[in-house]
């Protein structure tokens, strides 16, 4: 009888600029499953990692925002396809992280895939829904259109490690922003797996950068970073003191702030457009009409 | 050839100012608990009126009056009824337009031809535009059940006193909110005349409240716990302080702040039109404009020609009495602002830029600054980076479109920009690459109630004007 095979375990790393580095700090922390059993040593992102991620996101912004809306739609749809294809891996990660039954974990993956498909379709429609021509009182062409706000820091929800994660990530990148995302601290596995999906779905390197670790230590650097244009505080829901201090820090360069809710919302509920529109700028262009 | 102009002053008699004004709270003028301050004409330093300075208790009373009006009256009115009040206000503004224009020029120092032909007509148009929205909000594309926020605390600047009031009050009321508005310390008069207009329109008491005062009054208003919405137009510094003050609250905020707009002139631009656009861009309203085209980026190959024509055109600008119908550039709004313009201009010279102004005689009394041009400016110079908020233009050059865009975007601001070229595809490319909320192509400094206005980055957030301007005053507004 052959001895049982020793399985090959994966090292869980960060995702910055399309590469998978360990934390520059060399620190890691123990990610446990819902029953408190060891799952993995996740990289503990540092201030330097956050800064590197911002540099990568800024570098990727021109290219990503310059893609056609149709192309961004195709890439987001591709993310949904690859996620669906890796269903068992994600169902297991959600099951482990959130302590759900296999059936419930599968339903979460379903919803996450469907949400990506929903947002993918918005890429070439949002401009038509939130932009418009303006009938000014004079001989001028006048058009208002939404444009991405820039580099967005996203604190992903602590509880909903996949559906919540997808629900805060997809609406930000679909309009052309690039992202530095801090995953759920206690449940980082789905985020690390999603990074692998993004890396193989034609999402250009640097468009999404994923840091595993503690929002309380990493987020203040992102909130105060002068090359970050906006921040979504979803991941500090319920922590009024931290959320307030991050909003204060964000005022240094007038970041757009999507405030933290009092408690983590039910991510299964249908989203409204604000998850996208909070991170766009309306640009209005005038030109005279004449012969 | 030298032209001589005979004085053509607009009559002051159309304005009947009271010696002193109280606060407008709950539909009536009341005495404040704080002190009083004088508002002067910046053109002559003459005292125009004494105005109450609202303290915290006064602000609290105003917010409570606004809340009562919201709960008992305004939130219960149908949109169609709210609309009729706004239409009434628009009509009264048209009826009293000359009086408002003269009062504005007296208190602010801006040329009468601007207050008469730009500010006041646009104010009336703004009320007309938003009046029509009041009963159509469910069609605005901002959710299926648009609801007002409650009480809006609004703080406005001194550069377009009545126009900024209109930008704030009209959409707020159309969406069903009530307001407490604080006009700027140096330009309270047209807001107080507007309070009289609300009385003439029989607007229900407390729907509009006006508290005069300085920074402390504004601070008390934006941090009042009874305020659901804060709208501010002014400096980036104060905007940041407000963003910090509202952190951790549920208050919705819109901020219209500073700018350092690039006005880009390509070598194929219609030069005469571009020169007019450069002049309008920086000298309109003495350059007291947050979206002023204060950085001229001109393509190197035509820089010499553009500058020669610009200097010739600047030599014909008439600086002087704001009430004279021939005046192009009026008085600087305050001694404080004049000091800032002088300081930054001196820094420009000290840092090595070359300063030029046309020969021009300035009045002895009042606050004046000649139209001024700086050449040999680099991107590192403070006059190329900081908002001067005066009639001072910094000129830089570029060689390629890519360099123009890079230089234009090299600023923490992002309010507006200008592009001058006859090539359509270049306009669209450059307009799309510029990180600014308003891009004027082959025109500059155009405003319209239907057209949203507001900035990227440190120029603030939210939009005022147009359909987008409604989102700032509605719950669940999806923009």
Image (cartoon, coloured by chain):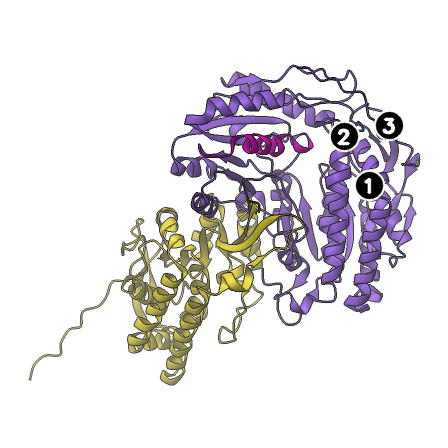
Chain colours: A yellow, B purple
Q: Is mark 1 on a helix, strand or loop?
A: helix
Q: In this view, does A166 lie to the left or right of A192?
A: right
Q: Which residue is drawn at 90% across and 57% down?
A: B202
**Left or right of A111 on screen, residue B160:** right
In the rendered image, the vertical position of residue B336 relative to residue B249, given as above or below:
above
Residue marked by disc 1: B190
Per the rendering, the mark at residue B109 is 2
Relative to A26, residue B408 above or below:
above
Which quadrant: the N terminus of chain B? top right
Q: Residue at coordinates 86% horizontally, 52% vertically from top-left?
A: B198
In magenta segment, residue A90? no
Q: Distance between the residues labelled 1 and 2?
A: 13 Å
| First in sequence: mark 1 vs mark 2 | 2
Q: Confirm whether residue B226 shows in the render.
A: no
Please, what is the dominant secondary structure of the magenta stretch? helix
Q: What element carries label 3?
A: strand
- In the picture provided, is B99 more to the left or to the right than B359? right
Residues B301 and A38: in front is B301
Front residue of A172/A255: it is: A172
Q: Range of the magenta residues?
A: B268-285
| Residue occupied by mark 3 | B47
- Residue at image position (74%, 28%) is B334
The reply, left or right, for residue A135 in relation to residue A13 is right
């Amino acid at each position: 009888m052959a001895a049982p095979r020793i399985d090959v375990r994966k090292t869980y790393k960060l995702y910055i600029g399309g590469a998978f580095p360990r934390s520059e700090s060399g620190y890691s922390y123990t990610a446990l499953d819902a029953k408190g059993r060891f799952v993995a040593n996740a990289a503990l992102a540092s201030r330097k990692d956050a800064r590197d991620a911002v540099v990568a996101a800024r570098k990727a912004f021109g290219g990503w925002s310059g893609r056609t809306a149709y192309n961004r739609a195709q890439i987001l749809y591709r993310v949904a396809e690859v996620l669906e294809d890796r269903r068992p891996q994600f169902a297991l990660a959600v099951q482990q992280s959130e302590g759900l039954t296999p059936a419930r974990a599968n339903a979460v993956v379903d919803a996450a895939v469907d949400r990506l498909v929903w947002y993918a379709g918005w890429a070439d429609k949002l401009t038509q829904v939130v932009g418009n021509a303006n009938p000014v009182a004079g001989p001028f062409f006048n058009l208002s259109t939404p444009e991405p706000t820039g580099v967005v820091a996203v604190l992903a929800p602590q509880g909903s490690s996949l559906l919540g994660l997808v629900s805060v990530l997809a609406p930000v990148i679909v309009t052309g922003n690039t992202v530095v995302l801090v995953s759920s601290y206690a449940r980082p596995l789905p985020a690390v797996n999603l990074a692998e999906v993004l890396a193989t779905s034609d999402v250009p390197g640097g468009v999404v950068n994923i840091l595993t670790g503690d929002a309380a230590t990493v987020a203040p650097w992102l909130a105060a970073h002068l090359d970050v244009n906006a921040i979504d505080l979803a991941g500090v829901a319920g922590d009024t003191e931290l959320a307030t201090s991050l909003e204060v820090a964000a005022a240094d360069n007038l970041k757009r702030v999507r405030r933290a809710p009092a408690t983590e919302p039910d991510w299964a509920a249908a989203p409204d457009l604000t998850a996208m529109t909070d991170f766009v700028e309306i640009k209005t262009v005038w030109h005279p009409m004449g012969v | 050839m030298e032209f001589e102009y005979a004085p053509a002053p607009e009559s002051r008699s159309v304005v009947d100012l009271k010696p002193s004004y109280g606060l407008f709270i709950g539909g009536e003028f009341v005495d404040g608990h704080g002190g009083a301050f004088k508002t002067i004409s910046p053109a002559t330093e003459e005292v125009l009126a004494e105005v109450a300075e609202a303290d915290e208790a006064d602000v609290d009373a105003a917010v409570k009056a606004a809340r009562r009006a919201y709960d008992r009256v305004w939130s219960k009115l149908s949109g169609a009824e709210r609309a009729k009040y706004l239409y009434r206000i628009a009509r009264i503004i048209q009826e009293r337009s000359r009086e408002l224009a003269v009062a504005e020029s007296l208190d602010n120092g801006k040329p009468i031809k601007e207050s008469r032909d730009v500010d006041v007509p646009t104010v009336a148009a703004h009320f007309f535009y938003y009046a029509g929205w009041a009963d159509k909000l469910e069609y605005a594309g901002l959710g299926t059940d648009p609801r007002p926020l409650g009480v809006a605390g609004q703080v406005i600047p001194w550069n377009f006193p009545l126009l900024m009031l209109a930008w704030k009050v009209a959409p707020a009321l159309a969406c069903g909110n009530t307001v407490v508005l604080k006009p700027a310390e140096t330009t309270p008069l047209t807001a107080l005349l507007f309070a009289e207009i609300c009385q003439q329109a029989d607007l229900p008491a407390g729907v509009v409240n006006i508290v005069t005062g300085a920074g402390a009054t504004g601070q008390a208003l934006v941090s009042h716990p009874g305020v659901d919405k804060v709208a501010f137009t002014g400096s980036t510094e104060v905007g940041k302080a407000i963003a910090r003050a509202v952190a951790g609250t549920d208050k919705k905020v819109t901020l219209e702040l500073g700018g350092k707009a690039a006005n880009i002139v390509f070598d194929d631009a219609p030069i005469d039109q571009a020169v007019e656009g450069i002049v309008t861009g920086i000298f309109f309203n003495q350059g007291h404009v947050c979206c002023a085209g204060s950085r001229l980026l001109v393509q190197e190959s035509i820089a010499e020609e553009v500058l020669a024509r610009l200097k010739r055109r600047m030599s014909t600008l008439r600086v002087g009495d704001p009430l004279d119908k021939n005046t192009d550039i009026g008085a600087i709004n305050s001694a404080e602002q004049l000091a800032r313009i002088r300081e930054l201009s001196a820094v420009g010279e000290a840092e090595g830029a070359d300063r030029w102004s046309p020969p021009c005689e300035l009045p002895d009394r009042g606050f004046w600054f000649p139209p001024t041009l700086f050449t040999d400016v680099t991107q590192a110079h403070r006059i190329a980076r900081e908002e001067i908020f005066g009639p001072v233009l910094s000129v830089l050059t570029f060689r390629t479109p890519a360099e123009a865009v890079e230089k234009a975007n090299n600023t923490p601001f992002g309010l507006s920009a200008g592009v001058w070229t006859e090539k359509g595809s270049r306009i669209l490319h450059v307009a799309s690459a510029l990180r600014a909320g308003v891009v004027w192509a082959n025109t500059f400094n155009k405003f319209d109630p239907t057209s949203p206005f507001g900035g990227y980055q440190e120029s603030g957030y939210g939009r005022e004007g147009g359909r987008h301007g409604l989102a700032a005053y509605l719950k669940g507004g999806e923009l």
